[in-house]
Amino acid sequence: MPAVVIVGAQWGDEGKGKATDLLGDRLDYVVRYNGGNNAGHTVVIGSEKYALHLLPTGILTPTLVPVIGNGVVVDLGVLFEEIDLLTARGVDTSRLLVSANAHLITPYHTAIDKVVERFLGEAKLGTTGRGIGPAYADKMSRVGVRVQDLFDENILRQKVDSALKSKNQLLTKVYNRKAIDSEAVVQELLSYAPRLAPLVADTALLLHNALRDGRTVLLEGGQATMLDVDHGTYPFVTSSNPTTGGACAGSGIAPREITRAIGVLKAYTTRVGEGPFPTELHDAWGDRLRENGGEFGTTTGRPRRCGWFDAVIARYAARINGLTDFFLTKLDVLSGIESIPVCVGYRVGATTYDEMPVSQSDFHHAVPVYEELPGWSEDISTVTDFDDLPKNAQSYVKALEDMSGTPISAVGVGPGRTQTLVLRDLV
Ligand code: IMP
């Protein structure tokens, strides 16, 4: 009854889709437990590239059941758009299940996300503008609309009417925008109900039974540790808990069922949106990582901020998530760099830190303490065995493993499904 969690160890875009996809053949269920269509998983299979935002990557593996858990916020327009796009490319999406308790992102959530960011100006968070924060805010304020509400028209109308009463005041009086017509929202949501009905399930019960029957369940986190609303760089975070604790709450699987927690870790660091990032590079090195690593957002197309590897963050992610393994991705992007700096601590004024500073203000002012590791010049994208990597590439991986205190069990050397060196079984 293995339940395995895959979680981003940095600020997202570590290549979680590739890690999930690698395990595909050994899994029975793949569950998304947090976030919504702010995520961006890119999976390359042969010459086909799939960019998924909301659907679990498991949708691409015909033998398993993809599940959208209760912790996800679902934009139904996006859900059916992704389903239609995949269907047009010959992917069978009929196994997909959606939790009856998942909350919906409605047109007013997206409108508010965009308007608030504009209103904040310089102080903006750099959200994806997909309505994620406002939908989670409504969930916590107990005025959200859930998947199951679509099947009780009266309840749906009551909930949308009541939510829009205050939101329209906000939109018109504070943000100087047009009010949103409640009935139009209700009709839009109802129009999805017939297509949604066959997908809706008590997914927590289903997963419980699956684990009891010895099935393998993968819990696939959106975003990442440093974007966690509790453990990330608040307020420059998303509005959910991508960390392993969130995997339990967002799926209904109990903590004691989790058998493995895999952190996906890029061989350098990237981040999109605003917020502190100690190892960020504002020079030609940053441009080089961005170009060689194709560091442009899957969801928004925004260029990602790039910097060197940060071992303090890797250690922190290992601790917060209780990681059993790391999956190191994009090692090939570092080929051709003579000497590679790796951040081993921070200096803030006269103080040196080897853990995350407790104060966010200190983290904003953290100056990285670097150690230089010797690089390699060879193209490693065709290597199939860890022992065939150049010695310095092997040492780089081993050094990161030592610094983070957690075994690196797989190493990505290119975007393709087969470009992964497996050092230890992940399930
Ligand atoms: P939101 O999730 O759209 O509210 O955005 C909040 C912050 O999380 C912003 O800095 C986004 O750029 C960031 N973010 C959200 N989803 C992802 C992701 O999948 N990868 C990387 N950053 C993300």
Image: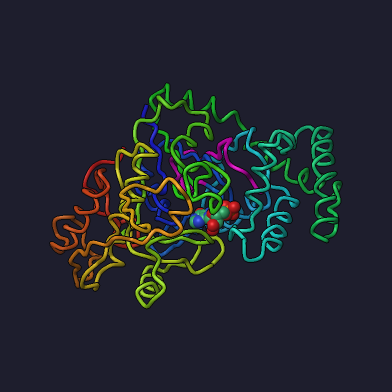
Nearer to me, 113 or 389: 113
Does residue 249 appear to the left or right of 194 in the view shown? left
**Residue 121, position as x, y percentages in the image:** 66, 65
282 is within the stretch colored magenta: no
- Which residue is at a point 86% across and 46% down the rendered structure image? 183
- Which residue is at a point 34% across and 47% down the rendered structure image? 355
Q: Residue furthest bottom?
A: 284
Nearer to me, 294 or 288: 288
**Residue 270, position as x, y percentages in the image:** 42, 61
- Which residue is at a point 18% across and 55% down the rendered structure image? 386
Name the quadrant of the C terminus. Answer: top left
- For the question of whether residue 206 can be seen, the reply is yes
Q: Residue furthest front?
A: 350
- Which residue is at a point 36% across and 49% down the rendered structure image? 264
Name the quadrant of the N terminus. Answer: top left
**Residue 326, position as x, y percentages in the image:** 30, 46
- For the question of whether residue 60 can be seen, the reply is no
Q: Is residue 63 above or below residue 1?
A: below
**Quadrant in which residue 63 is drawn:** top left
Q: Is residue 425 above or below residue 42?
A: above
74 is within the stretch colored magenta: yes
**Quadrant in which residue 336 is drawn:** bottom left
**Residue 196, position as x, y percentages in the image:** 67, 41
The magenta segment is 56-75
Q: Is residue 392 above or below residue 2?
A: below
Give the quarter the ligand 1 occupies: bottom right
